[in-house]
Amino acid sequence: MSTKPDTRTDAGHLVDVRDLSVHFELRGGTLARLFARDTGTIKAVDGINLRLRPGEVVGLVGESGSGKSTLGRALLGLVPATSGSIRLRDQDIATMSRRQLREIRRVVQMVFQDPNAALNPSMTVEEAVGDALRVHGMKSAAQRRAGVVEALERVGLSPVELFLSKYPRDLSGGQKQRVVLARAIVLNPTLLVADEPVSMLDMSVRAKILQLMLDLKKDLDLTYVYITHDLATAKYFCDRVAIMYLGRVVEIGPTEEIFATPRHPYTKALLAAIPEPDPDKMVPRDLPRGEIPDAAEPPLGCAFHPRCPEAVHNCGWESRDLRTLIEEHWLRTDAAAYDEEKALIGGLDHLDTPATTATLGVGGSSPVRAILDRMKVEDPDEPLWSGVQSIEDSEPGVTVSFEPAPSPPLRRAGGVDVACVLYPDEGP
Amino acid sequence: MTMDLTDQTVAPAAGEPVISARDVRVWYGTTRGAIRAVDGVSFDLMPGETLGLVGESGCGKSTLGRGLMGLLPDGAKRDGEVLFRGKDIFSLSAKTAYQMRGRELGMIFQEPLTRLNPLMRISQHFEETIKQHEPNLSKDEIRDRALEVLRLMGIPPTRYRSYPHEFSGGMRQRLMIGLALVLRPAFVVADEPTTALDVLVEAQIVQILNDLRHNFQTSLLLITHNVGIVAEACDRVAVMYAGRIVEQGAVTDVFKNPQHPYTQALLRSTISLTTTGLNFIEGAPPDLVDPPDGCRFHPRCPDAMNVCATKNPVNIERPGGGRVECWLVGPEDQIPPGGQQPLKQEELTVVDEA
């Protein structure tokens, strides 16, 4: 956006995340390890670029499993980066030692989702908030108390004397989250990573905590990374929003632009799915099918294509999509037809290995072809068929070949960046 | 009774209510005294109707759902009258109540993984449920019936013999709904069925719940804290605060023209895509061991009058249909002289915050 400073220069960024990946190795069982079987990698964060300007609120939005929390934790060095860099001013968090990380946490702090789990039940409010000061070398108890009192007053827990000696069990959910916020700001950080800070709270309290976070931002010149699955609070709270899916950013840009003109089909789906308290609005009918897939074996091509209502021929169709389609077809047939077709098609489990070709059927190529033809007639608009390059006989069944397609990169499209084949590059 | 698979529109709820609750109360015994979690709740549920029970945590909505099912923990007591097709289910013997659960009264829980046996295949879950209540069915009939329900839930027949861990979160919730519905109960309580799910999956489940009335003619009590889900999936709504239903009526009426200040505040505090400012309710819900006199919302109510702090509000007909209990709505002739003066409120601080 022209009204905001250019994001493509290095200057003036508080945090600069480049090509960050966080991968987790799957350990597998003892036997698998004994025979050195490859059990796979989860790419929780897969090549992400993100820059934060001072004073900005950036939202990381996505479903569970999208990698938004892992990205947030990586900003504090809580999970090791597999590759890439996280530059905070002149230092790289991705390569820091534990000792250096402890120092950096004066500057970067985290607010956790569940205030019940984030507070030690055997520590009073004063101990919980003062502990951060103690860890960072403030030896004098009187000084610590002064710091705690100031932080508690800032988060609205006053009169402070009433709260200092309270345990978490004596506090309500909203008060606990205020204590968590006090602990995060007591060291005077510049960046706060807030991981779903209000999603465990009741509706009537959520707004209050969000307002408090906005006040803190103004008073303390904070920069926020706001991690959430809730687009409604992100819309209100964030300056910029990054929509994440399966470890990647699929759309990123200024909040107004993303909400006014969502471009990626996933963003559109998330927006349509929010239950609005408006009785005139009906349940949306064209929702993406299925759920976020297994991150250990993400879909080929665009990771969202199996669920995408706008998918086209070059989205990366593959064997597992064919399985889903056949199973959906069997949801519509009656029991007798299912038994008959099942006997011709045979097992589907071999389709779970991702590939752009799929062999199918045990009952001869022409009856299997007939079933596929029936499926095509049943739902001619199904985009998978446009991605089929050929169906060849391979007794006792057929081989279906799909058009191979790469995962689309983030490209500029009208003020935002979108990773979708529907938005080819606008050019420089 | 046959299951209707076509998407025909159901005739408007007519005739006798399936569930008719009158003055239901549930207490939990504690060392501090009895917690009156549900304190005099009345509502009717028509055949094929979905009633949304909405409120904040601690308002008693889950307790009410469990109380109706007879699934309260030890140390809880219930009172009142709940007529199910004319029979009072609160006065049934333990054995009869056990037999009714599942077959006539179904329940859908929040966390499906903790409710499915990890060592049993899905087929076994369904077979056991059906056999328990309909011992005369043959093996094939049981299988057909289970597969029919699974199909309506969007679970392909190829997955019939899988184990719970092989399903995703949304699929497991569909399995739970399928298990609750396979015996075709006339009344189902769904306690926060979508809270643990992602927004897209939540929308899918809401859609399934919305279709229940077409596919199963089931009456549904949908317990949720999300007013958006109520707006999308329910015919009527009951707003609960501190153990009482403070307002109930058709969703369109109540959401477009909320009468009770709590309903107004709850709707206002909801952050939605159209939110342009943050609103919240000051203070916290009361301690249910010793709730405030008069209207329980009066200490937090911006429009409280003198009468609200002293006299219990009367449950009256809501303008536009439904029920509401608030002195602002009426009846005016029962307000004592001077009662309409604004109440002098104590300052609410974070000390009292929820």
Image (cartoon, coloured by chain):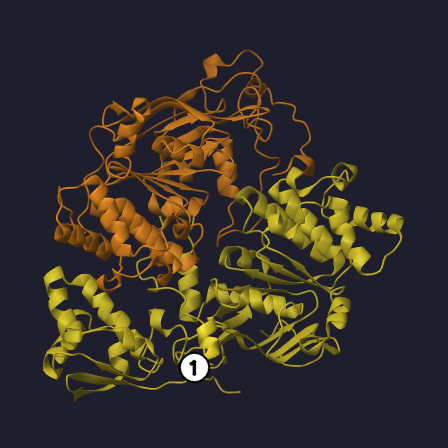
Chain colours: A yellow, B orange
Q: Is residue A202 above or below residue B76?
A: below
Q: Report the residue marked by disc 1.
A: A407
Give residue B104's position: percent from left, percent from top.
24, 36
Give residue A298's position: percent from left, percent from top.
42, 75
Q: Amino acid at mark 1?
A: Ser
Q: Is residue B98 above or below residue A422?
A: above
Residue at horizontal 38%, vertical 34%?
B71
Q: Is residue A427 left or right of residue B223?
A: right
Give residue B122's position: percent from left, percent from top.
28, 55
- Image quadrant where one finds the C terminus of chain B: top right
In front here: A289 or A206? A289
**Would you say residue B150 is visible in this rendering?**
yes
Q: Is residue A269 above or below residue B265?
A: below
**Would you say residue B207 is visible in this rendering?**
no
Question: Which chain letter matches label 1?
Answer: A
In front here: B205 or B246? B205
Give residue A113's position: percent from left, percent from top.
58, 54
Q: Is residue B329 left or right of residue A14?
A: left
In front here: A254 or B181? B181
Q: Residue A333 falls in which quadrant of the image? A: bottom left
Q: Is residue A61 left or right of residue B7?
A: right
